[in-house]
Amino acid sequence: MNEHITQSEINQAAWNACDTFRGPVDPAQYKDYILVMLFLKYVSDLWADHLEKYREQYREDDARIERRMNRERFILPIAQLKGEDKDNNEIVIDEFRANFDSLYQRRDQANLGELINITLAAIEDANRSKLQGVFRNIDFNSEANLGQTKDRNRRLKSLLGDFNKPELNLKPSRVTEDIIGECYIYLIERFASDAGKKAGEFYTPRQVSLLLARLAGAEPGHTICDPACGSGSLLIRTAEETHSDNFALFGQEVNGATWALARMNMFLHAKDAARVDWCDTLNSPTLIEGDQLMKFDRVVANPPFSLDKWGQEDAEDDQFKRYWRGVPPKSKADFAFISHMVEIAKRQTGKVAVIVPHGVLFRGGAEGRIRQKLIEENLLDTVIGLPAGLFTTTGIPVAILIFDRSREEGGENERRKDVLFIDAGRKFTSGKAKNILEEVHANKIVETYEARSEVERYSHIADLKEIAENGFNLNIPRYVDTFEPEEEIDVTAIQAEIDQLETELADVRQRMTGYLKELVVDA
């Protein structure tokens, strides 16, 4: 067997394991079971690999080696299952290592779902600082999701068999953390495609995440926050743009199951020091210091578009005063997220990069007033229009807004008094299910942004006076003229060509009449 496995091989092997659930279980549900099993298999193989190496290195008994590993890595404890011996009327305790191998050995037991739950609970309890609460929303013994006992056991046994195949041997000698992490993101992406509109709560398309991360431009030493982090992929991509290990990650996610994905995603990318909180960012944010919101160097997000019933009724009395520019409408939370993100960016240095629906650029009312104040404060730096159809959740075109607090008085860019508009909506590759923002398209956006350049029919720099004259409407066609001039038509030349063709046609008709007369005479 080849000792090394490629990214595509592990991706395909993990995706094939989903066959166990396809059909009887909805993709929005079975994704959690597959991703948790991948996580369990990886940490089990990693733990076994370290145990073997520690035995060779320290020549100690297993108890001491385990204590050493527990201090330096993570813990796979001994789990217990209490049962009853009816023949002897005694309580029987089954002790086993809380790992994948123990479950595989017990795959024929009638209480397999319960055993998996006990294993996960034991791992979570032993690693509270990294995994507390991660598995609370997943139930491998659920009749509602996985069927009655016989069917449930059959599916779970099949799932364990899928992950026990040689190509899913995930020891570090065969795979790296990067490959496992990328496989995790690959599965999330595939699940997003299958789940359609339901996927918006946990996934931002890879090419959009990469673009947003590049535009945010995080640097070594930066604190990075995503207040609507989903499965955490955007946070990870933004951290990777620092090209270092010197950063601190923070996230907030309102959906419990999605928050658990983010925590596991961080662990698999060796970023388990990240603080990702399960909370409602708009109504009860938890990233606070004292009685103030924490401040960050970079704030990135792909918040849910135009979220309804977001808590507008309590926003006027928000204890953190985030909505002092105005309270967004009840049916659209877009500017609520923007207001929050701007307020948690560090004064005079912080930057915000956020994905929004195009309505944010031009809608009036409360949104128009908030937009105007942000522009008048000189915080808005760049507006980028992206193609339609990039997301599995919607076919509408979206935009990226970049707010830069270094444009404030005392900031490095306080003299910048204009806004860069980029119309990249026509630059994409058509795909079957969705359009694709290729690297060449993203590169052009980033190059234009960094150079802050005007490109004919692609970008324009508008001063604040021009924006004010447009009523603080940011609709991109008002600023970037994408009209392709038509070639000038020479009417006289075309008429002469028509006259020539008509003369030739008359000559042909005359000759055809002569030929027909000759045919009649010959007959």
Image: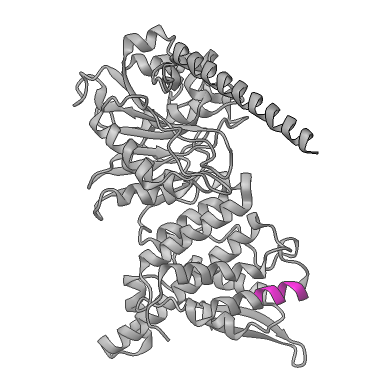
Of all residues shown, which one is farthest toward the right? Answer: 523
Residue name at image x 60 percent, y 64 percent: 33
Quadrant of the frame with the C terminus = top right
Q: Picture coordinates of residue 471 (x, y %)?
A: 44, 9
Quick one: 457 or 475, which is closer to the camera? 457
Q: Main secondary structure of the magenta part?
A: helix
Q: Eyeballing the image, is 198 above or below 344?
A: below
Quick one: 392 or 352, which is closer to the camera? 392
Q: Is residue 324 visible?
A: no
Q: Is residue 320 left or right of residue 443?
A: right
Quick one: 315 or 383, which is closer to the camera? 383
Numbered circles on residues, count:
0
Bounds of the magenta segment: 150-156
Q: Picture coordinates of residue 428 (x, y %)?
A: 45, 40
Residue name at image x 38 percent, y 19 percent: 374
| Residue 427 placement: quadrant | top left
Q: Is residue 174 left or right of residue 453?
A: right
Q: Picture coordinates of residue 347 (x, y %)?
A: 28, 28
Residue name at image x 54 percent, y 28 percent: 333
